[in-house]
Image (cartoon, grey):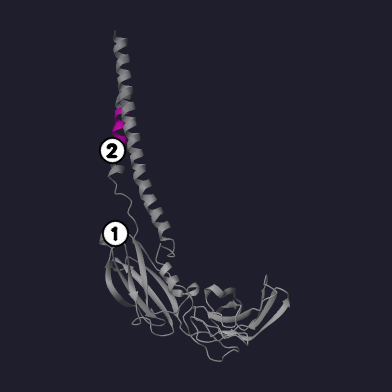
Amino acid sequence: MQKIKLIVNLLFINLLVGLVLLAKPAFALAPTVSITELGEYINSNSFNLSYSALTDDPGATNAQFYYRKEGGSFTAFGPLLIGASGHVQVTPSQVNEHVKYYFKVEINSGVASDETSSNYDTSGPSPVQNYWKEKVAPGLNRLHWKNPGDSDFSRTFIYRGETPGFSADGSHKVGEVGGAPDAEMSWDNFGLDASKTYYYALRAIDKADNSASLVGDAEVTVQSPSVTGVSNQAKTESKVSELPKEASVLAEITEKVPSPASTKDLSQNASSEVKGSTEGISSKWIIFGIVILAIVLGLFFLYLRKKRNNIQRL
């Protein structure tokens, strides 16, 4: 009889423990938010900034954007946005000087925030210098030049045509070469038709994707959709121009609307948070199942014991 009481007590305790675990609140998500991540440089002061948030109640989530210049303090701009995601328009009212800008988004009055920053730059670099071309062998031309000395110099685009008046656009771009500022450079163009004459034009690009004026062969009068005319010598002044589509920073900004992470892997964090919540709920159902199984086994044990006692009395 004592054994039966002990088993019943254990079953009762297990049942209470299971009910307590089931009554425990579900795992709560820690609010997080991610903002569009800008590159080191931008050359436009009109673009969208987006956010993506993860909270327990997306419909009750609100977001506010802020901006500041280097050395200044944050100022709110744009409307208060409602929902788990959205965007705000950056305009010349916020970005209007060639300095570094910081952008921030806060959700639910600051329970979570995220920042990004970029240097605003619309000044083109100086053109390449000391350009000249040599025919090394049949089918091989070698170009020589010196990179501009601008600290934000990034790379040089190389265009080639078969007529002096070719268009320096994406269809004639044959090379892209980096290198340090003021570095002496050379580039080999293999596989050419030895019976043809080829003409070249070079254009320096900075880190904000601003371009310098074109520099090319002495006889070249290159037509360009982004630079009017072409210089056959390096100019001392720089010329700002809009690049062809292959180097547009606006396209990069549009493509970086948070996935998120460009926005710092928020999607991965979200999946891990949700997974943790799902695993927490699943474990409670496993405990509940174990408790029920223990009760069933206990009752079955009591039934067998009672049946054995009845047989012994007979």
Magenta region, residue range: 7-18
Q: Crowdedness of circle 2 by 10 Å Cα count: few (<14), some, many (20+)?
A: few
Return the mark for residue 16: 2
Q: Which numbered dot is residue 202?
A: none
The three-letter code of the residue at mark 2 reads Leu
First along the sequence among labels 1 and 2: 2
Q: Position of residue 170 (x, y in %)?
A: 52, 74
Residue contact at pointers 1 and 2, CB within 8 angstroms? no
Name which quarter of the figure residue 37 lies in.
bottom left
Is 245 placed left or right of 203 in the picture? left
**Which residue occupies the extreme front position in the image?**
195
| Label 1 residue SS | helix
Given residues 54 and 308, the one toward you in this image is 54
Q: Which image quadrant for residue 295?
A: top left
Q: Position of residue 65 (x, y in %)?
A: 33, 72
Disc 1 and disc 2: Cα gap in Å?
Answer: 35 Å
- For the question of whether residue 109 can be seen, the reply is yes
Residue 257 counted in the magenta span: no
Residue annotated with mark 1:
58
Amino acid type, callout 1: Pro
Q: Identify the residue shown where x is 32% and y is 23%.
A: 300
Q: Quadrant of the C terminus?
A: top left
Q: Which of the 4 quarters of the picture holds residue 198?
A: bottom right
Local secondary structure at mark 2: helix
| Quadrant placement of the N terminus | top left
Nearer to us of marks 1 and 2 is: 1
Q: Residue at x 41, y 85 (%)?
A: 97
